[in-house]
């Protein structure tokens, strides 16, 4: 199993009040229901105020690297990426469980 972890940091000048944020959050929340390879999917805003904290997280669980590759190119996932690319930068980790 592979745990896919994505941490998003809003770009300078983008706040939670930005009108692009809610649609991006909504798309992210729906990825788990749209991408069949995901066994688990959770998203949410980070509540930490520490300077090193990221703003939003998405965490999924997939069977293997082939499933991860299918997830990455899935059209709905690509739509979510497009929305987040406008407002954030991110880092990822794919961890074998």
Image (spheres, grey):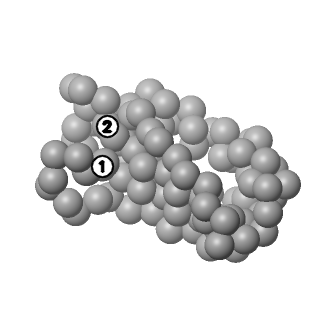
Q: Residue 55 has which mark?
A: 1
Secondary element at tag 1: loop
N-terminal of the pair, mark 1 or mark 2, is 2
Q: Using residue 9 as the reference point, say whether residue 24 is left or right of it.
A: right
From where the camera sits, is residue 36 visible? no
- Splitting the image into 4 quarters, where does residue 40 fall? bottom right
Q: Using residue 55 as the reference point, say whether residue 6 is left or right of it.
A: right
The x and y percentages for residue 53 are 25, 50
Cα distance, mark 1 to mark 2? Answer: 7 Å
Tell me if label 1 and label 2 are in contact, CB under 8 Å: yes
Between 70 and 24, the residue placed more toward the observer is 70
Q: Using residue 64 as the reference point, say whether residue 11 is left or right of it.
A: left
Q: Residue at x 66, y 46 (%)?
A: 77
From where the camera sits, is residue 83 visible? yes
How crowded is the residue under tag 2: few (<14 C-alpha within 10 Å), some, or many (20+)? Answer: some
How crowded is the residue under tag 1: few (<14 C-alpha within 10 Å), some, or many (20+)? Answer: some
Please determine whether, in this image, residue 23 is positioned above or below residue 60: above
Q: Residue 10 has which mark?
A: 2
- Splitting the image into 4 quarters, where does residue 17 fall? top left
Q: Residue 17 has which mark?
A: none
- What is the tally of numbered marks visible in this picture? 2
Please determine whether, in this image, residue 74 is positioned above or below residue 35: above
Q: Residue at x 50, y 51 (%)?
A: 6
Secondary element at tag 2: strand
Between 11 and 91, the residue placed more toward the observer is 91
Please determine whether, in this image, residue 16 is positioned above or below residue 47: above
Q: In the rendered view of the protein, which quadrant contains the C terminus? A: bottom right
Q: Residue at x 22, y 26 (%)?
A: 13
Q: In the rendered view of the protein, which quadrant contains the N terminus? A: bottom right
Q: Using residue 54 as the reference point, say whether residue 25 is left or right of it.
A: right
């Amino acid at each position: 199993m592979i745990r896919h972890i994505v941490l998003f940091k809003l770009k300078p000048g983008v706040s939670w009040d930005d009108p692009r944020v809610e649609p991006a959050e909504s798309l992210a929340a729906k990825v788990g229901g749209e991408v069949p390879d995901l066994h688990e999917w959770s998203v949410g805003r980070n509540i930490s105020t520490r300077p090193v904290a990221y703003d939003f997280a998405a965490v999924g669980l997939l069977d293997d690297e082939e499933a991860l590759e299918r997830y990455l190119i899935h059209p709905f996932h690509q739509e979510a990426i497009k929305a987040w690319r406008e407002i954030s930068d991110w880092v990822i980790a794919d961890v074998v469980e």
